Image (cartoon, rainbow, N blue to C red):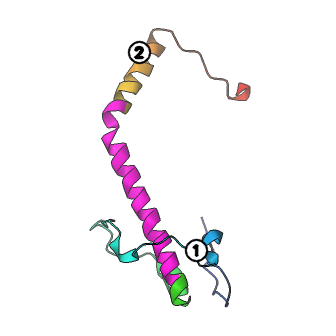
Amino acid sequence: MTTNPPQALQPGDRPPGFPKRWAGGAAPRGDICSSPLVLSSQASTMTKALKKAFEVASRLPEREQDELATAILEELAADERWEATLAQSQGALERLADEALAEHRAGRTKALDPDAL
């Protein structure tokens, strides 16, 4: 898969993926350095694409850099919370899967027709 490198931003441009609702400065409040996010020790190098994104972002005004940093940190923290929630629910998911397999083996299921959905 080929991706195009990010284009340089012009004054007034909004970086790709930067939420429109924050373009006017209404970013979420909070200290961007106080995120509970703990980065993995396995991530020791940045990809070329991420380096380029940070290079482009470094040319934004300070306020927009902070808004973008807040958005990135919040997204990473949300991913971490999702992973933790999913890990805690493994027992329940296994029970549901066992129940579904038992119902299927007992002939209490029907084939799903995606066209009928």
Please state the horizontal and vertical placement of residue 52, each as a whole percent of the image. Answer: 52, 82
Which badge, 2 or 1, comes first in the chain's sequence? 1
**At x 43% / y 58%, what residue is drawn?**
78
Residue wearing tag 1: 26
Residue wearing tag 2: 102
In the rendered view, does 13 fall on the left or right side of 91?
right
**At x 67% / y 89%, what residue is drawn?**
10
Residue type at the position of mark 1: Ala
Residue type at the position of mark 2: Ala
Asked whether 92 or 48 is in front, the reply is 92
Q: Residues within 10 Å of mark 1 (few under 14, many from 20)?
A: few
Image quarter for residue 93? top left
**Image quarter in which the N terminus is found:** bottom right
Q: Which residues are magenta?
A: 65-92
Image quarter for residue 61? bottom right
Instruction: Let me know if residue 78 is in the magenta part.
Output: yes
Q: Residues within 10 Å of mark 2 (few under 14, many from 20)?
A: few
In the rendered view, does 51 fall on the left or right side of 17?
left
